[in-house]
Image: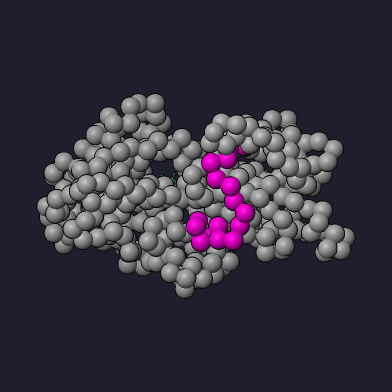
């Protein structure tokens, strides 16, 4: 097939604008393939996301999904270097980080700056939930539900990529690709309650005397002494976050997977109070928070990955990518999407 034929014949739909879907879209677009990305969220990024709240007492900003990124693979390390040059990413060394610990990178001025940089130049439609997929003689058609709840058909597309967590991938797959469905069914995700707490008053203890947050790898650390807390981060201490008298001092608390699973369907307000109380021992604040919210991530972290980089069915022209193919990190999501695109281009 000549390149010109390839370009006119091939059009790819990607469902999911998380890091995996964006990496896949970027690589395909760079090969001059026509790609459209659909995401049900309000902006690209998926589990790499930021909540910004304007209150009369000041602005609060929380990275309520991924806290930071680590880079081990050479290609992903190059991407992070390029993002540092574009000032979309900066290093984060929280107090208490062990010397020699793996560098932790954060989006600047928020974690969502990272997916935003990945999304640049791509054709992405947000607030567009794909309700079903259908393979016909002329290719794949999607049923897309927009914010006004109208459902419209999109397509046909020659190829389709599912870049959503395994449960959502399985729901869309139906019996369209039994081989992919079989693999997706082997992945297991853990939930996570994330609590966002913002304080107006000056911190009651100086940073130097405050207890140190856990080191960056504390994210995956098992809770000790029966604590429900797996991870605590001082978000206001990250690079280029809102600061000064008009900014709240912002903290993010993650419950452990076990605790989150046990309390998954409980009331968010109650979860916020309970986890804040448990986290007080590690925080410099004794005052009540000005802002307190809890976010329930049903599919937060990969507990059991499939164990290969992606799924691709060349006969049916359907693929799947996401962190859950490889492991529980942003880097894994990026590698999965990128490697799927490479396979689709060969
Ligand atoms: C609380 C928390 C803390 C974390 N901390 C870290 C950390 O510190 N470091 C780290 O490396 N990783 C961390 N992670 C994991 C990291 O966020 C993920 O590994 C990574 O973001 C996964 O990217 P993804 O593209 O595979 O999936 P996602 O980010 O989940 O993207 C999937 C996308 O698909 C969309 N979607 C799903 N179904 C549909 C549909 N039917 N129609 C349209 N769109 C759909 C969703 O809206 C979403 O945007 C954390 C995750 C959580 C939740």
The answer to which of 116 and 295 lies nearer the viewer is: 116
> How many marks on residues?
0
Question: Left or right: where does residue 323 sit relative to residue 210?
Answer: right
Task: Tell me where residue 99 sits by quadrant.
Answer: bottom left
Q: Is residue 119 visible?
A: yes
Q: Is residue 214 visible?
A: no
Locate residue 91, reporting x and y percent: 38, 66
Task: Tell me where residue 96 sits by quadrant.
Answer: bottom left
Question: Left or right: where does residue 258 sit relative to residue 22?
Answer: left
Question: Left or right: where does residue 194 sit relative to residue 165?
Answer: left
The answer to which of 144 and 68 lies nearer the viewer is: 144
Locate residue 254, reporting x and y percent: 34, 43
The answer to which of 224 and 36 lies nearer the viewer is: 36
> Where, quadrant-wise, is the C terminus in this rendering?
bottom right
Residue 126 counted in the magenta span: yes
> Where, quadrant-wise, is the N terminus in this rendering?
bottom right
Locate residue 94, reporting x and y percent: 30, 61
Q: Looking at the image, which residue is at 85% across and 38% down?
A: 137
Q: Looking at the image, which residue is at 31% across and 60% down?
A: 241
Q: Looking at the image, which residue is at 30% across and 38% down?
A: 293
Q: Which residues are magenta?
A: 115-130
Residue 210 counted in the magenta span: no
Locate residue 175, reporting x and y percent: 73, 30
Question: Left or right: where does residue 187 sit relative to residue 3?
Answer: left
Q: Residue furthest left?
A: 204
Q: Looking at the image, which residue is at 68% across and 47% down?
A: 13
């Amino acid at each position: 097939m000549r390149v010109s034929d390839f370009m006119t014949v091939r059009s790819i739909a990607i469902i999911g604008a998380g890091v995996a879907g964006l990496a896949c879209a970027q690589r395909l677009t760079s090969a001059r393939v026509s790609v459209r990305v659909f995401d049900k969220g309000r902006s690209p990024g998926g589990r790499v996301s930021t909540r910004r709240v304007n209150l009369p007492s000041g602005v609060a900003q929380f990275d309520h999904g991924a806290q930071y990124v680590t880079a081990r693979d050479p290609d992903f390390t190059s991407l992070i270097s390029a993002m540092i040059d574009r000032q979309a990413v900066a290093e984060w060394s929280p107090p208490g980080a062990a010397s020699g610990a793996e560098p932790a990178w954060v989006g600047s001025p928020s974690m969502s700056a990272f997916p935003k940089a990945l999304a640049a130049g791509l054709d992405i439609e947000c607030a567009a939930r794909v309700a079903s997929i259908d393979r016909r003689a002329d290719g794949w058609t999607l049923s897309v539900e927009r914010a006004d709840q109208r459902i419209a058909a999109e397509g046909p597309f020659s190829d389709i990529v599912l870049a959503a967590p395994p449960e959502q991938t399985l729901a869309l797959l139906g019996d369209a690709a039994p081989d992919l469905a079989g693999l997706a069914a082997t992945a297991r995700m853990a939930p996570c309650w994330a609590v966002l707490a913002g304080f107006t008053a000056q911190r009651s203890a100086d940073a130097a005397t405050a207890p140190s947050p856990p080191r960056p790898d504390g994210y995956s650390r098992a809770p000790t002494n029966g604590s429900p807390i797996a991870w605590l981060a001082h978000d206001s201490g990250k690079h280029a976050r809102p600061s000064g008298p008009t900014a709240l001092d912002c903290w993010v608390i993650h419950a452990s997977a076990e605790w989150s699973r046990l309390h998954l369907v409980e009331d968010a307000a109650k979860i916020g109070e309970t986890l804040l109380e448990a986290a007080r021992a590690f925080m410099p604040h004794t005052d009540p928070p000005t802002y307190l919210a809890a976010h329930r991530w049903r599919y937060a972290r990969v507990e059991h990955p499939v164990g290969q980089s992606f799924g691709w069915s060349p006969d049916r022209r359907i693929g799947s990518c996401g962190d859950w193919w490889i492991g529980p990190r942003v880097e894994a999501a990026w590698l999965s999407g990128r490697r799927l695109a490479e396979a689709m281009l060969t």
